Amino acid sequence: MKPTFIERGTAIASRLLGNEMMVMSVKDSTFFTLNELATVIWNAADGCTDLSEIVCQKICPAFDVDYQTAITDANRFVEELSQHGILVASGQPKNAIETVKVSA
């Protein structure tokens, strides 16, 4: 499986209410309420950590879910939010992309 590095989009507004994150796309006013599990992924979306690492280290132990179920759901979640620019997914970590831009 290819790595997927995720980071939060730049054209968003977000606020934590209890254990849930409220996120809105500034581009199209799409609004999402992220449950506690999705909020863990959101908070870990630093652009440098592979999604499979987030699932293995944060999701599986905290929510007592098997890895295959969790990674399938996490990929679906990332895909949906990426379509609205709320999350940005890449095959390379953020620092590697910045290094390539500087070197080019």
Image (cartoon, grey):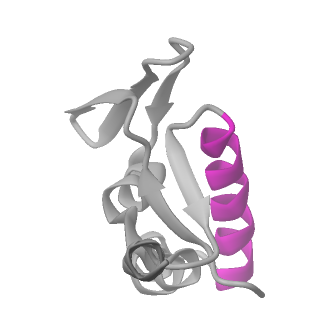
Q: Position of residue 38 (x, y in %)?
A: 47, 51
Q: In this rendered view, identify the residue nearer to me: 103 or 51.
A: 103
User: In the image, what residue occupies the spot 64% across and 75% down?
Assistant: 91
Q: In this rendered view, identify the residue nearer to me: 7 or 72.
A: 7
Horizontal placement of 62 versus 3: left or right? left
> How many discs appear?
0
Q: Main secondary structure of the magenta part?
A: helix
Residue 48, above or below 81: below
User: In the image, what residue occupies the spot 40% across and 53% down?
Assistant: 42
Instruction: Answer whether residue 75 is magenta in the image.
Output: yes
Q: Which residues are magenta?
A: 67-83
Q: In this rendered view, identify the residue nearer to me: 78 or 63.
A: 78
Q: Position of residue 8 (x, y in %)?
A: 40, 49
Horizontal placement of 29 versus 8: left or right? right
Q: Position of residue 14 (x, y in %)?
A: 29, 30
Residue 21, above or below 99: above
Horizontal placement of 47 versus 66: left or right? left
User: In the image, what residue occupies the spot 46% across and 69% down?
Assistant: 63
Q: Quadrant of residue 57?
A: bottom left
Q: Quadrant of the N terminus?
A: bottom right
Horizontal placement of 85 versus 8: left or right? right
Q: Position of residue 44 (x, y in %)?
A: 35, 65
